[in-house]
Amino acid sequence: MEFFSFIGIASPVIIIGIIVFFVIALVQEGKTAGRGEAVKGAFLHAVSLVMLAFIVVSVIYLLQLGLRSWVFTKAQDPYHYISPPPTLYLSSDKATSGPVLYGCSEKCEFSDVDKEQLKSWKESYQEWKKDQSGTSSVTLQRKRNLVNASSFLIVALPLYWWFFFVMLQKEAKKARDQGQKPGPLRSVYFYLVAFSGLIGVVVSAALLVNTGLNAALKIDEDKSQPRPELTVPQIDRNGVKSVINCAEKCSFTAEDKRLAEAWLADYDQWQKNNVTTFPPPSSSQTSLANNIPILVVTLPLFLLHFLIIRRESAMETIPGAPTTSSTS
């Protein structure tokens, strides 16, 4: 799953949260603080919630990526498949049920259509080699998702710090200093984040316990069999072999022949990599890699927000309670 797909997990919480904030702001706080202050408070809390969601999802994704790369290396990786080098397909007027392979023993057998195909193939193959950049597409895709998640984290962190820790905390301290109770937006914000964190804790913990019980009781053990060796259809090679066979008769350049020979080597390496590089995935390691980061992030998220709002609620009911600002 790519990061931009993964980040969609937070969308329902964000949408519900924003709707709740604006409804409460306009209906409840608008009665006492005025519509302008209510809209301002809704805006600050909504932005804080969105930035926090980006931070949480980014951190979870980065932790999962790190665990898959260095700890649970047998966890199922959606990017284990390496794309093969592009294949050269040739057309032939000859009645044959098998693959097309030109020998060019007497003359060039490449038609004009074949030569156009060859031209397109060279461009595609060179682009494929450029994309590989000396590394597998798995490593490349992991780096791309690392950059994507880190980019959201770098942008969201300072925005969350500014809107929540600077502006909202300042407003809350000002209200307490004036002997006023924090508005309902603050309570809804903290309880909504705590509730979302609790859901993440329950789901991830349950799945981890399930994985542990399955392992302890030897239920649903990993019975993954090694993947069968990939077979490369002969037609996939014959187009490129035809370039080598016909290089002299068709006046192909030395670069054309070199590309064809390089393609054969790259194709062999692709086949070898897909069979030996990636071990059969482990369902237990996949579960651990997916759920440990969720538990690690959502547990402190739940505890922090729940305890803060409970403490503030208790302070409001205790006569003469101190009005020192709390931090989150």
Image: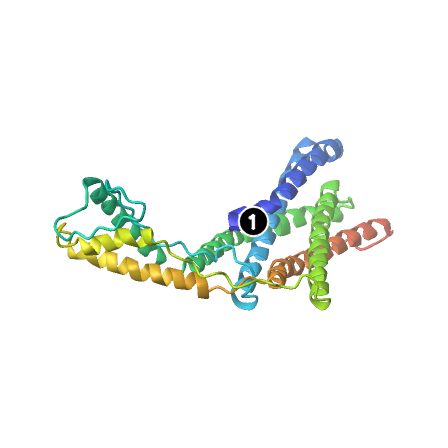
Residue situated in front as seen by the camera: 84 or 10: 84
Is 286 rendered above or below residue 8? below
**Which of the colour schemes (rainbow, by chain, secondary structure, one colour) is used?**
rainbow
Q: Where is residue 215 in the image (x, y as percent from the top left)?
A: 69, 66
Q: Position of residue 227 (x, y in %)?
A: 50, 61
Q: What element carries label 1?
A: helix
Indicate the quadrant where residue 263 lies. Answer: bottom left
Q: Position of residue 82 (x, y in %)?
A: 42, 56
Residue type at the position of mark 1: Phe
Does residue 134 appear in this view? no
Left-right relation of 79 to 257: right
Q: How crowded is mark 1: few (under 14 residues within 10 Å), some or many (20 or more)?
A: some
**Quarter containing the C terminus:** bottom right
Residue situated in front as seen by the camera: 101 or 3: 101
Left-right relation of 166 to 326: left
Say which residue appears at 30% left-offset and 62% top-offset: 265
Say which residue appears at 67% left-offset and 39% top-offset: 16
Number of numbered labels in the structure image: 1
Say which residue appears at 63% left-offset and 52% top-offset: 165
Residue situated in front as seen by the camera: 3 or 35: 3
Does residue 168 appear in this view? yes
Indicate the quadrant where residue 137 lies. Answer: bottom left
Q: Name the residue under label 1.
A: 6
